[in-house]
Image (cartoon, rainbow, N blue to C red):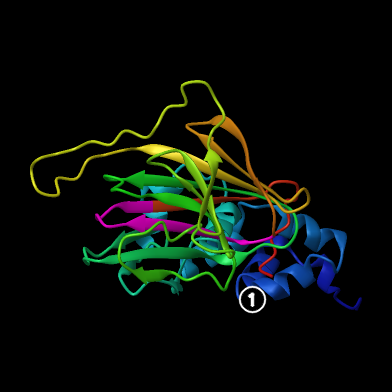
Amino acid sequence: MAEARWSNLNHSVLEIIFSYLDLSDLRGCSLVCKNWYRLLNDEDNDVWRMHCVRKLAEEALRSDILSSVPTYKAKLRAFYHAWDPHECSRNVYIKPNGFTLHRNPVAQSTDAAKGKMGFRTGRHCWEVWWEGPLGTVAVIGIATKDAPVQCPGYVALLGSNSESWGWNLVDNHLLHNGDSQGNYPQLNNAPKYQQVMDFAPMVPVQVGERIRVILDCEDNTLAFERNYEFLGVAFRGQRLHSAEQIYRLTPMVLTFYYGLLDSAMFDTK
């Protein structure tokens, strides 16, 4: 009787086995043989579906947040790059879906949150949806692990020191090391984000803008898109964490990671 070969196992059997392995083990399995590589490179099979079911909250899978994400592997990739509940201000609450954060209305405090994954190589893109009024200061950008996520008073925390770079959506200023780095984007009559002033106390106002953050670790640049319009390079600098600052009011902020722009492989490092 011929000896059974692991590489020749039926795909349905392999999918069951692989669905119980850690992601780091799956990366090694994809290098064993062409058959396993092809199976794991299929981003919408039962391997990735079962990992999604185990890792992602049902709220996230059923919500509109991931409705446009085409495959289970892409949904899982987005989850592993979502907000980090251990890297945010104590005044920030990460919702169970993992993609939405909410700031508790605490006076005299500026609060921020970071993503779970930092980047050293590659080109990366993630999208931020800001739902609700922006407040006096609303900054998005990137930061190192050493950047603070909370400080007393009302300041532009992201961009306030050498560990972070930010774009203030309210006044279109770029911020780094505590100083303004000029206006952004460099367009004639650049549109500012609409500040809606409701005289009813804290009435939520849907802003609905989508901002894509594009980090190129090869060219060391940070750029932004606003409603799918490329706004140009904002900063040239370091390899950094993604970060989002929220300020004073109670916005709901969602983030979605599109992935490594020039590679289809999934890497949790």
**Residue 243 image position (x, y, % from top left):** 50, 59
Mark 1 burial class by Cα count in 10 Å: few <14, some 14-19, many 20+: few
Residue 152 among magenta residues: no
Depth check, front residue: 16 or 110: 110
Residue 155 location, quadrant:
bottom left
- The reply, left or right, for residue 155 in relation to residue 212 is left
Residue 246 among magenta residues: yes
- The reply, left or right, for residue 75 in relation to residue 260 is left
Q: Residue at x 36, y 65 (%)?
A: 111
Depth check, front residue: 228 or 27: 228
Three-letter code for the amino acid on which mark 1 is drawn: Asp
Q: Residue at x 43, y 69 (%)?
A: 149
**Residue 192 image position (x, y, % from top left):** 39, 32
**Residue 181 image position (x, y, % from top left):** 56, 45
Quadrant (top left/top right/bottom left/bottom right) for the N terminus: bottom right
Q: What residue sits right under mark 1 in the picture?
A: 22
Quadrant (top left/top right/bottom left/bottom right) for the C terminus: bottom right
Residue 15 location, quadrant:
bottom right
The residue most toward the front is 179
Q: Residue at x 70, y 64 (%)?
A: 267
Q: Is residue 186 visible?
A: yes
**Residue 87 image position (x, y, % from top left):** 47, 72
Q: Is residue 95 visible?
A: no
The stretch of residues the image draws in magenta is: 239-253
Magenta stretch prevailing secondary structure:
strand
Is 20 located above or below residue 153 in the figure?
A: below
The residue most toward the left is 200
Depth check, front residue: 164 or 251: 164
- The reply, left or right, for residue 219 in relation to residue 49 is right
Depth check, front residue: 26 or 177: 177
